[in-house]
Structures are given as structure tokens and as C-alpha cells.
Amino acid sequence: MKKHILITGATGLIGKKLIHALQENGHTISVLARKPGKIKNVTVHLWNVYKHQIDPACIQGVDTVIHLAGEGIAEKKWTKERKQKIIDSRVLSAHLIHKLIKDANAPVRAFISASAVGYYGDCGDEILTESSSNDYGFLAECCKLWEDAADKGKSLGMRVVKFRIGFIMARREGALAALDKPIRLFAGAPLGSGRQWVPWVHIDDIISMFTAAVDEPSINGAYNACAPFPVTNETLTRAVAKALHRPVWPIHVPEKVLEMILGQMSNVALISNNTSAQKLLDEGFKFKYTHLEDALANIYKK
């Protein structure tokens, strides 16, 4: 069944590719954007989350919302003001959409939201399922508030899906681009102990997860949006270096050095999330890339 889908965060890493994939499946796409712009075969509506402004026409005819909007977690150092903005950009935006849906009595049936594995905090080697507890720290707090905001859609009769996304593998974009930059410059080294688990996922599989959530009403609740076999930071670093034909330094970057450079944001690189993808597998989801080496071979192919 073809749907009319409203997407926030449409210009981000996931949003750009997701629009194309959904259009190929025959769905109609509208987006909410902060600035006027043109996207082929897409209706663009304007909003300003911080001023609580949203174009009411954006919800007309829409039956599915995909919520990807949010300030970049690792774009700037975490000051008190920056951390609040990271939270507000995710939480206030969800509240604004839900309020519009309620006020317009719009027949939206599904609210599909991004989240992140940071929900679990730093859990060492513990295997994390979707029923694992929410932990402490800024990332865990942010993700909990993010998901709670998405869950408000339940009271409006919507099916709510939350994808706890890990380390996305994409060419020249996102987390992988930040990791491989020093490796390309012959300065690659594991971070901290190097033993922290990194729940990686190829961008193609992330797109497939969101498209499946649009089409399959059985997909409901929270999912670890990560490949079935997470790896340690050291394994990831060495695998990327091998794919790029670069060496890895025999020393690790000390946690204190990372804290001096990045401040509290160093937590992004140092927390350990050993996630399980079993819930997605039980839904019948078929990963295109289950092994790190295959994902990297695809990304770095000439």
C-alpha cells in the first residue's frame, strides 16, 4: 500500500538516501525543513522548532511520519547550552509534530523515529537487548528523552517505532569519515583501551530498516539498528586501516588525551555497547551486510 510520508531531518545522512528509496517504492514524500529549498518530487514545508512554528499544511494527507531531525551529536564540544540544544532539537520537534497531529485530528498511523545505542550508556561486555535498562550519562539521558517524546504518539493511536542506531558505515560521511581521516593520514590508532564494543551498521541496511518499518505493521517498539556482529574499537580501527592499505600505530590514544581534545564528547568514542540484533532478525529482517569486512569492501570499492 502506497503511503504519504512526512520526513524530518531529510537533508542528513539517512534522510537523503531514504527519500530516494521510499520514492522508488512508490510512496509520496513531504519534508519539514528549516530553510526553503527544492528536492525533486518532494513537497517542502517550513518549521522552526525553537520558536514552536510549523506549517500546518505539512500533515495534510500524511499517514506516516519519519522523525530524523536533531542537532549533530559530535559536531561541536558539549557545553551546557550545546547539550540542551541537542536534546531540544529531538524532543521539542517530536512534541511539535504530535501537537499538530492532535489539533488537526490527522489520521497519522505510524511514527518512526531515530534513536541511538547511546540509550544504554557504557555497558562494557554486557550483551544489550532492547529490554536492557537505560543507563546514566548525557547520551543515555538524551536518548531516553528522545524515545519518550516519540512514544507520545501512542496516546494518539499511532504505531511507534524507535531505531537505536549504531556506528553508521557510509562513504565519506558520518562517523566512518571521522574515524578514517587520521588513518588515511597514517595516524590511525585504537582509542582508549580499544576494547569498547562498537555496534556498526551499513547505511544500506539502515535505509532498509526504515523502509521495512513503513511497510510492515508488525514492526513496533524499539530495535537495535545494528549489524548482528559488533566489533571492538581496535578491531574496527584495524579493519578500516586494512581496507585503506594503511598501518595502525602500536600504541593507543589515551582516554585523558581524548578528554583534553574533545571534553565530555569523548564519551562518544569510549562507551561500549555490545548490542544484539536478534529482535530485528526475529522480525525477518535480512541484513545485506553482516560482516564488517564485507561492509568496508563495499564502501571503499574503487
Image (spheres, grey):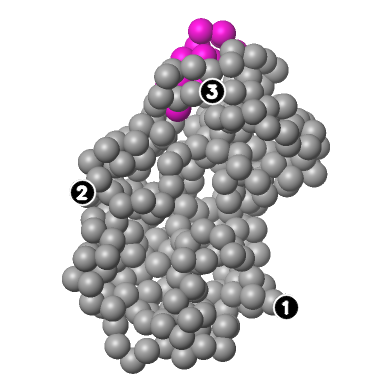
Crowding around mark 3 (Cα neighbors within 10 Å: few <14, some 14 to 19, many 20+) is many
**Residue 220 circle label:** none
Ranked by sequence position, the earlier of labels 2 and 1 is 2
Q: Pick whichever, 213 or 88, lies toward us.
A: 88
Secondary structure under tag 2 reads loop
Residue found at x 23% / y 77% = 254
- What residue is shown with label 3? 47
Q: Position of residue 233 (x, y in %)?
A: 38, 74
Q: Can the viewer see residue 144 in this picture? A: no
- Residue 91: give x, y in percent of width and height: 38, 31
**Residue that badge 1 annotates:** 302
Name the amino acid, label 1.
Answer: Lys
Q: CA distance from mark 2 to mark 1?
A: 42 Å
Callout in the foreground (3, 2): 3
Q: The N terminus appears in which quarter of the rendering?
A: top right
Give the overall secondary structure of the magenta segment.
helix
Please tell me in which quadrant of the rendered image residue 264 appears: bottom left
In the rendered structure, which segment of residues is drawn in magenta? 93-107
Q: Report the number of discs.
A: 3
